[in-house]
Image: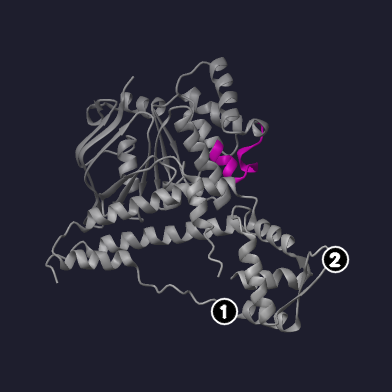
Amino acid sequence: MYTTIVETKNVCKTFGLNGVAVEAVRGIDLTVNAGEFVALVGPSGSGKSSLLYLVGAMDSPTSGEVLFEGHDLAKLRDGPRTDLRAKKIGFIFQTFNLLPTLNAFENVEIAMRLGGMGRSERQSRAAELLERVGLSERAKHQSRHLSGGERQRVAIARALGNRPSLLLADEPTGNLDSKTSTGILELLRAICSEDGQTVIMVTHDFRAASYADRVMVMRDGRIRGETKLQAGQDTTQAMEKLLKLEFQ
Amino acid sequence: MLPYTLLGLLASRSRHGYDLKNAIEQAFGGQREINFGQIYTTLSRLERDSLVTASEAEDGRGKKTYSITPQGQNKLETWLDLIVEKNETYKDEFLVKLIVRHMAGYGDTLAAITRQRQAYLQQLRDLTALSTQKGDDPYVSLLIEGAILHLQADLHWLEMCDERLEHLERPI
């Protein structure tokens, strides 16, 4: 049981675009511990998605280290690396990326099948996960018949199938209206605070970021500041302040 | 705004003082207790200005009924149609602090921005939690959404401050 899930040490990523070097990530030290909900917020081009992809072993750094549960990702060969991505890291995207010909249940199940889980275990787990994300009644619906919010819930259930150490979310509410977004963000926070899932979320929306415990603001490939947030406890005070009507 | 609130309530029908108190509390989220003193003082002024009339109850029990006058109606409608001017200026005290900090040669703008951002993000978190609880009340939920939108704008503006002021090196 690791307490530090991810640690980056002076990690850099430079892309070559039309012969020009673009420094997407410039020397970032980021530590994420088990059970944390971290948001990386910044405008487009800030490097937040690039950083997420490095942490998720989807990409390799130009320099610096990415340690996943203490292991240097650079030292992993292809086989173990693919294995890590399949079993230890769950990923959800702005565009959901479900398999359209499969129904909700099958979409969740297939990820576990690819992770090598046995049939009866993955079926019972798929049912359990769909229940967790509030979609038991939609289990047999084809993914193309599901709403955006429902698809994202299926995507979350799928991502959690193999009990990943880390759930990564790249703009999970980018394609959703604000009410649906709230539902998804509340679900992410619940799986973190109630189930202990470690989550790293990339967003350009401060409102979404405020659901996290730690908010890292990024700009030009660097972390500009970190904020730790408390649970929304003082709602009475917020309410008082809001309703301070001055009747003359 | 209490005079206009009372006029608005009386425009729909005549009411007793107690009815007015209840109606205000209900309309504005049920959270704020208005005291009778304020209401009766305001009603007296409205009477004095001929915007409202008061009549004793027929049963003589002394419970007054308040009614709006045509002048009162006119005053209310004029106020409702006036465009609302934002009475605070666009000046932001935080910006002044940043400039003054720079003038004083203290530097460390980023730390100041980070602290301010912390406060805004925490408020955003608190308001979002409140929004979930108060979704049913139209006035309160709109007030909360407005506040959330302002905070989002303030946070984006802080990013701009960080970006533009990052390279200011020499004090003014």
Residue A185, x across and y down, in percent: 50, 42
Residue span colored magenta:
A140-153
Return the residue nearer the eye: B11 or A87: B11
Furthest-left residue in this view: B170
Q: Is residue A112 left or right of residue A25?
A: right
Q: For mark 2, give the secondary structure.
A: loop
- Residue B83's tag is 1
Q: Is residue A227 left or right of residue B63?
A: left
Quarter occupied by residue B133: top right
Q: Is residue A97 in sight in this rendering? A: no
Residue pointed to by mark 2: B60
Q: Amino acid at mark 2?
A: Gly
Q: Of the two numbered discs 1 and 2 on the same chain, state the one appearing first in sequence.
A: 2
Residue A132 located within the stretch drawn in magenta: no
Local crowd at mark 1 within 10 Å, few (<14), some, or many (≥20)? Answer: few
Report the residue at 57% width, 15% height from top.
A120
Q: For mark 1, give the secondary structure.
A: loop
Report the residue at 54% width, 20% height from top.
A122
Quarter occupied by residue A11: top left
